[in-house]
Amino acid sequence: MSSATNDFENELVRLEEALLHQAADDRTALHQGNASTCKLHDKYDEQGIAGEHAFSQRYKLFHDMSRKPRGDGGIDFLRVPLLFDVDVKCSENAYQLIVEVGTVDADIYVLAQYRGKMTNAKLLKWCWRADVLAAPHKQYSSGKINHYIDRDDPVLRKISKLDMMILRKVVDDDDIDSSVQQ
């Protein structure tokens, strides 16, 4: 590969990072002081957008980074063109999938890990809404009560299974919770 090609690709990555950082900064500013917004740390929005970006890149979906003063309603990716609504939960450590009690609205929850750069998050595992609703819950330092599922819990499935469902639109009826089948 030529030096000019490398320079061009590096510049694209730099611009992509800058765009994602700007979207995270905008989201943070938009929700500052909102009592319903739970910010666990300074990089909360940055990590969230990084996880959403990883999902959009993997499945070639539009990443909607538009300003939403009332939030995204717990859904990052809508059914179209997917078969399901998806919410990506991304954090640096990603030891658990954590979803606030009372906000379990998506069909699928994806656990992602932030790895230092906005364009470098990794999708780890996923589960159905019913799995989140059945998970134990506790109060975290934020004061909010959250469902939690440990990353090693077998209820969290491999991303390769999600790949099969989304990329090939192949669905095993035995693996869909009843709330999605309706």
Image (cartoon, grey):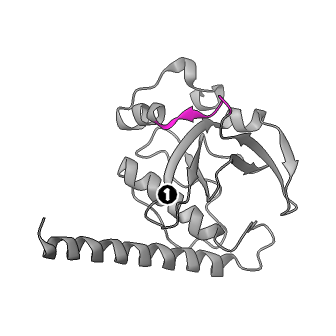
Looking at the picture, does residue 52 appear above or below residue 86? Answer: below
Q: Is residue 167 magenta?
A: no
Taking the view exactly as shown, the residue that stands out farthest to the left is 2
147 relative to 178 in the view: left or right: right
Quadrant of the rendered image containing residue 74: bottom right
Looking at the picture, does residue 17 appear above or below residue 123? Answer: below
- Looking at this view, is 87 or 84 the one in front? 87
Quadrant of the rendered image containing residue 178: top right
Name the residue located 11 percent from the left edge and 70 percent from the top edge. Answer: 2
Looking at the picture, does residue 8 appear above or below residue 88? Answer: below
Q: Position of residue 153 (x, y in %)?
A: 68, 33
**How would you rate the neighbour count of disc 1 (Cα within 10 Å): few for under 14, some for 14-19, many for 20 or more?**
many
Judging by the rendered image, the residue that carries numbered circle 1 is 121
Q: Position of residue 48 (x, y in %)?
A: 58, 62
- Looking at this view, is 72 or 98 the one in front? 98
Taking the view exactly as shown, the residue that stands out farthest to the top is 174
Q: Is residue 156 magenta?
A: yes
Name the residue located 43 percent from the left edge and 46 percent from the top edge. Answer: 80
169 relative to 26 in the view: left or right: left
Quadrant of the rendered image containing residue 144: bottom right
Count of marks overlaid on the render = 1
Quarter that holds the C terminus: top right
Mark 1 residue type? Ala
Quarter that holds the N terminus: bottom left
Magenta segment boundaries in residue numbering: 153-159
Q: Position of residue 157 (x, y in %)?
A: 57, 32
Q: Position of residue 17 (x, y in %)?
A: 42, 73
Looking at the picture, does residue 144 appear above or below residue 34? Answer: above
Name the residue located 55 percent from the left edge and 55 percent from the top edge. Answer: 76
